[in-house]
Amino acid sequence: MSSARLEQMHTCVICFVRGCKNDNKMIQGVGVESPSEEELHQACWDHGLLGLCSVDEMREHVILK
């Protein structure tokens, strides 16, 4: 794999992580109890946590981030 391709992939990962952090800050700003189950599910899905299925698990994830 070329160094240019690795740099491009690194940039994509950095952007993804920043987006996840911003999402978590926004959710925490409105309160963990505020997001709907669908919003929590989408946030966990976006973060690659496909195995979390209960609302309590999803809220815990948002709090820990």
Image (spheres, rainbow, N blue to C red):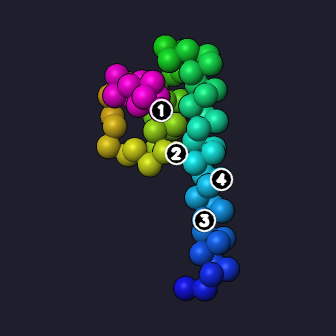
The CA distance from mark 2 to mark 4 is 13 Å
Residue on which disc 4 sits: 15
Of the two numbered discs 2 and 4 in the rendering, the one whose residue sits closer to the viewer: 4
Give the crowd class for mark 4: few <14, some 14-19, many >=20 residues within 10 Å: few
Res. 51 image quadrant:
top left
Instruction: Please check the rendered image and state whether residue 24 is part of the magenta-colored stretch, yes or no.
Output: no
Point out residue 21 in the picture as x, y percentages from the top left corner: 59, 38
The CA distance from mark 3 to mark 2 is 18 Å
Residue type at numbered disc 2: Asp
- Residue at 63% x, 61% y is 12
Instruction: Magenta stretch: give its range.
Output: 56-65
Residue on which disc 1 sits: 65
Label 2 vs 4, first from the N-terminus: 4
Q: Which is nearer the eye, 33 or 12?
A: 12
Q: Which element type, helix, strand or loop, lies under badge 3?
A: helix
- Residue at 47% x, 28% y is 62
Residue on which disc 2 sits: 46
Pointer 3 and pointer 2: residues touching (CB < 8 Å)? no
Q: Which element type, helix, strand or loop, lies under badge 1?
A: loop
Residue on which disc 3 sits: 10
Horizontal side of 40 relative to 10 (left or right) equals left
Residue type at numbered disc 3: His
Point out residue 53 in the picture as x, y percentages from the top left corner: 33, 34
Q: Main secondary structure of the magenta part?
A: helix
Of the two numbered discs 3 and 2 in the rendering, the one whose residue sits closer to the viewer: 3
Residue type at numbered disc 1: Lys
Point out residue 40 in the picture as x, y percentages from the top left corner: 48, 30
Label 3 vs 2, first from the N-terminus: 3
